[in-house]
Image (cartoon, rainbow, N blue to C red):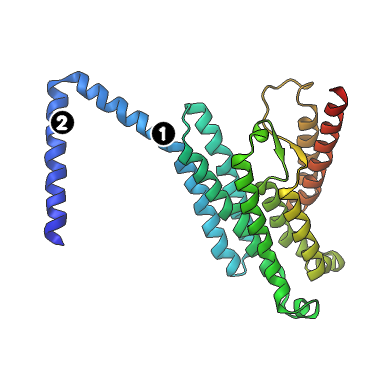
């Protein structure tokens, strides 16, 4: 084995020395080599950011299984930031590839599908869960992972979702779920008890799962320009979201998601009347 690695080392050094010698003798080769490296690096930058999304999701899963649900929620937020920037960077660098699209879906499946499922799974109190349907009820949490996979697969094939979303995006669902542990820690014992009630959790699981694969048209949050008239509903959503986050912090996310759905349906209804 040692001889094998030494052979590879010698071969690499030999190739590098020849390449360096040729770059000194032929400057055009050096320029081409440099341009090739830059082009190759540009191509892999968005995928690297996507892998950081996946890495955040993996860390979040380990935290969730250890009962650190608040920290696991922060992992979802970090993953969402990476998920936003991988597409933005790809557009800025004018690089895209089929593998990038597939990798993005796989990363989202972990960060916004499996991780939220584990968070809800951990929210089920063993004693109360058994009282409301037995031990099995807590495993309903993984319906979120199943329907997230269906949502992502549908998104990759659905050409209608270039300018709008059809169904609730998986990041929005994940953000909704990460807020539940924060609400469960509320100083109000009634609110805290309701959030951790097995039947309430089961209703939320079913509602979010169905919303992800529904045919409900939801507005994309991408601003094509900054004109108020073209982005009125987006600006309203951003304004309401900022106010709610300042007042209620992370506990405001469910209200923001519901507001997002209502504004999207209102916008769709208005556009339908104009046609």
Q: Is 200 drawn above or below residue 29 in the view shown?
A: below
In this view, the residue in front, 221 or 165, is 165
Where is residue 203, by image quadrant?
Answer: bottom right
User: Which of these two is toward me, 168 or 124?
Assistant: 168
Residue sitting at x 21%, y 19%:
28
Examine the rendering and report whether any part of residue 238 can be seen. Answer: yes
In the rendered picture of this protein, how many numbered marks are placed on residues?
Answer: 2
Q: Nearer the viewer, mark 1 or mark 2?
A: 1
Mark earlier in primary sequence (1, 2)? 2
* Disc marking residue 43: 1
From the viewer's perspective, is 52 left or right of 15?
A: right
Whole-angstrom CA distance, mark 1 to mark 2, is 24 Å
Where is residue 12 shown, x and y percent of the image? 16, 43
Residue 35 percent coordinates (x, y): 31, 25
Rendered residue at 11%/47% (across/down): 10
Q: Which residue occupies 80% across, 37% down?
A: 264
Q: Which mark is residue 205?
A: none
The correct choice, above or below, for 219 with respect to 31 in the image is below
Whether residue 197 is visible, yes or no, is: no
Q: Residues within 10 Å of mark 1 (few under 14, many from 20)?
A: some
Could you say which is closer to the camera, residue 59 or residue 132? 132
Q: Position of residue 58 (x, y in %)?
A: 52, 58
**Is disc 1 in contact with disc 2, using a CB cutoff of under 8 Å?**
no
Query: Please, what secondary structure does the residue beneath circle 2 have?
Result: helix
Where residue 145 sits, quadrant-wise, is bottom right
* Placement of 173 over or under 160, stated as above or below: below
**Left or right of residue 274: residue 141:** left
**Screen quadrant of the N terminus:** bottom left
User: Looking at the image, which residue is at 55% across and 35% down?
Assistant: 87
In the figure, is residue 56 to the left or right of 112? left
Per the image, the residue denoted by label 2 is 20
Circle 2 crowding by C-alpha within 10 Å: few under 14, some 14–19, many from 20: some
């Amino acid at each position: 084995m040692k001889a094998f690695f030494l052979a590879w080392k010698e071969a690499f050094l030999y190739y590098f020395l020849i390449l360096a010698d040729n770059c000194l003798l032929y400057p055009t080769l050096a320029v081409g080599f440099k341009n090739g490296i830059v082009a190759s690096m540009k191509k892999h930058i968005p995928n690297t950011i996507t892998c950081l999304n996946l890495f955040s999701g993996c860390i979040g899963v380990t935290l969730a299984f250890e009962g650190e649900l608040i920290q696991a929620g922060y992992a979802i937020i970090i993953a969402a930031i990476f998920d936003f920037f991988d597409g933005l960077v790809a557009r800025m660098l004018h690089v895209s590839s089929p593998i990038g699209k597939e990798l993005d879906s796989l990363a989202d499946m972990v960060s916004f599908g499996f991780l939220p499922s584990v968070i809800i799974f951990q929210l089920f109190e063993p004693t109360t869960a058994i009282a409301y349907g037995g031990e099995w009820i807590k495993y309903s949490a993984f319906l979120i992972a199943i329907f997230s996979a269906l949502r992502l697969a549908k998104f990759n094939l659905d050409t209608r979702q270039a300018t709008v979303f059809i169904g609730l995006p998986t990041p929005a669902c994940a953000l909704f779920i990460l807020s539940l542990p924060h609400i469960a820690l509320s100083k109000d014992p009634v609110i805290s008890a309701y959030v951790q009630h097995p039947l309430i959790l089961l209703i939320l699981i079913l509602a979010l799962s169905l919303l992800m694969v529904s045919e409900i048209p939801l507005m994309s949050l991408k601003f094509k320009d900054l004109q108020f008239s073209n982005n009125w509903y987006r600006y309203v959503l951003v304004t309401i979201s900022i106010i709610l986050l300042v007042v209620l912090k992370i506990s405001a996310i469910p209200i923001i998601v519901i507001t997002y759905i209502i504004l999207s349906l209102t916008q769709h209804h208005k556009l339908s009347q104009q046609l």
